[in-house]
């Protein structure tokens, strides 16, 4: 196994609108699509589409959305042996609104995702120990996330923790144990209390995460400005620029970046980190040029120039 993902599985219910609604405002959309989502599921599918052997650890409800989610994983050759089915709770859903500029607003209802526990991680330790890379996010109970990251550390498996969605106060080990701590600009602002709108803000936030939270490699994605990276030790921080494009739909672009990064860490671990981040960024940029979340992710053939 190359990439194992622990996280949420949702069904995306996406409405396409001229503009995002304000408080109390009712608007008409011009299109609607149902798709597969959840940050964990998205990241796992991205890594799988690029060619990594992958496994998903999570939970879905015993309903039509859950059955479809399992079928989607199987269609992408993702191992579902540690994907549980919960009676009495729905599969997670995410109603999404996307405006004509490709910006989005998302509501997440966790459903069965909230039932993922440290005991589930204990049962999945064998599959985690066989991986090269573990990826986690912040959409399931953090006790399970921390258990997974600690299991990866125990078995010398590289780990990525994507603190998304962000919260101000989390367990200290979730900063210091993962090999890579990754957030976007708004998430960095929430977790550090530092305004992150540009390179200077990203530098300040990364220094805070290193000095105060003992984070290891830190990646702060800055949208069209690129990604700021603070490596380990005495290595100098760097900014990886992002190709400028006109986004059609930015939903799931951050997950595309994480999934692609996981793939590159597993497949070409000796590639310099700067190159890995640059290639993951290019793959994420490809995803914003199509509508949808997982459906917008490039295949291995489409992304081949960025994979080695």
Image: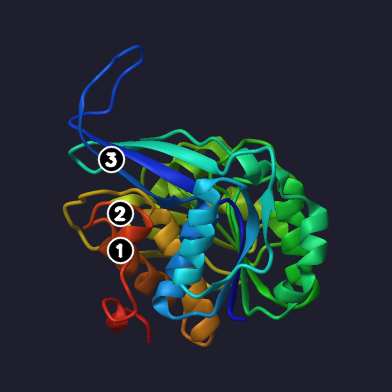
Number of the front mark, 1 or 3: 3
* 202 sits left or right of 232 in the view: left
Pointer 2 and pointer 1: residues touching (CB < 8 Å)?
yes
Q: Is residue 175 above or below residue 107?
A: below
Which numbered dot is residue 161?
none
**Residue 274 visible, this angle:** no
Mark 1 nearby-residue class (10 Å; few <14, some 14–19, many ≥20): some
Front residue (pair 200, 120):
120
Could you say which quadrant of the image residue 96 lies in?
Answer: top left
Q: Tag 3's secondary structure?
A: loop
Q: What is the CA distance from the residue labelled 2 to the residue labelled 1?
A: 6 Å
Q: Which sits earlier in the primary sequence, circle 1 or circle 3?
A: 3
Point out residue 189 in the picture as x, y percentages from the top left corner: 50, 39
Which residue has dot 3 on it? 103
Q: Tag 1's secondary structure?
A: loop
Q: Tag 2's secondary structure?
A: helix
Q: Is residue 51 above or below residue 151?
A: below
Pointer 2 and pointer 3: residues touching (CB < 8 Å)?
no
Q: Which sits earlier in the primary sequence, circle 2 or circle 1?
A: 2
Residue at 23% across, 63% down:
243
Which residue has dot 1 on it? 241
Q: Which sits earlier in the primary sequence, circle 2 or circle 3?
A: 3
Q: Is residue 40 above or below residue 170?
A: below
Point out residue 160 in the picture as x, y percentages from the top left corner: 59, 64
Which residue has dot 2 on it? 225
């Amino acid at each position: 196994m190359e990439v194992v993902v622990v996280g949420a599985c949702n069904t995306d219910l996406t409405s396409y609108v001229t503009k995002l609604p304000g408080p109390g405002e009712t608007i008409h959309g011009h299109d609607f699509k149902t798709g597969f989502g959840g940050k964990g599921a998205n990241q796992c599918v991205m890594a799988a589409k690029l060619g990594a052997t992958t496994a998903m650890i999570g939970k879905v409800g015993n309903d039509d959305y859950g059955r479809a989610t399992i079928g989607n994983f199987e269609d992408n050759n993702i191992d579902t042996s540690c994907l549980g089915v919960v009676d009495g709770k729905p599969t997670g859903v995410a109603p999404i609104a996307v405006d004509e500029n490709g910006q989005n607003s998302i509501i997440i209802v966790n459903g069965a995702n909230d039932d993922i526990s440290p005991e589930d991680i204990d049962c999945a330790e064998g599959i985690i120990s066989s991986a090269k890379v573990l990826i986690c996010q912040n959409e399931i109970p953090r006790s399970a996330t921390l258990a997974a990251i600690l299991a990866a550390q125990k078995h010398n498996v590289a780990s990525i923790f994507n603190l998304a969605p962000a919260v101000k106060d989390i367990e200290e080990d979730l900063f210091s144990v993962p090999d890579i701590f990754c957030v976007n600009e708004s998430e960095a602002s929430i977790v550090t209390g530092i305004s992150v709108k540009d390179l200077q803000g990203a530098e300040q936030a990364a220094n805070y995460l290193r000095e105060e939270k003992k984070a290891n490699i830190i990646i702060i994605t800055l949208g069209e400005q690129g990604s700021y990276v603070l490596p380990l030790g005495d290595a100098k921080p760097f900014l990886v620029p992002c190709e400028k494009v006109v986004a059609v739909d930015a939903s799931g672009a951050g997950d595309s970046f994480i999934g692609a990064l996981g793939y590159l860490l597993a497949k070409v671990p000796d590639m310099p980190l700067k190159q890995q981040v640059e290639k993951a960024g290019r793959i994420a940029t490809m995803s914003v040029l199509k509508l949808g979340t997982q459906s917008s992710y490039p295949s291995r053939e489409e992304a081949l120039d960025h994979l080695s």
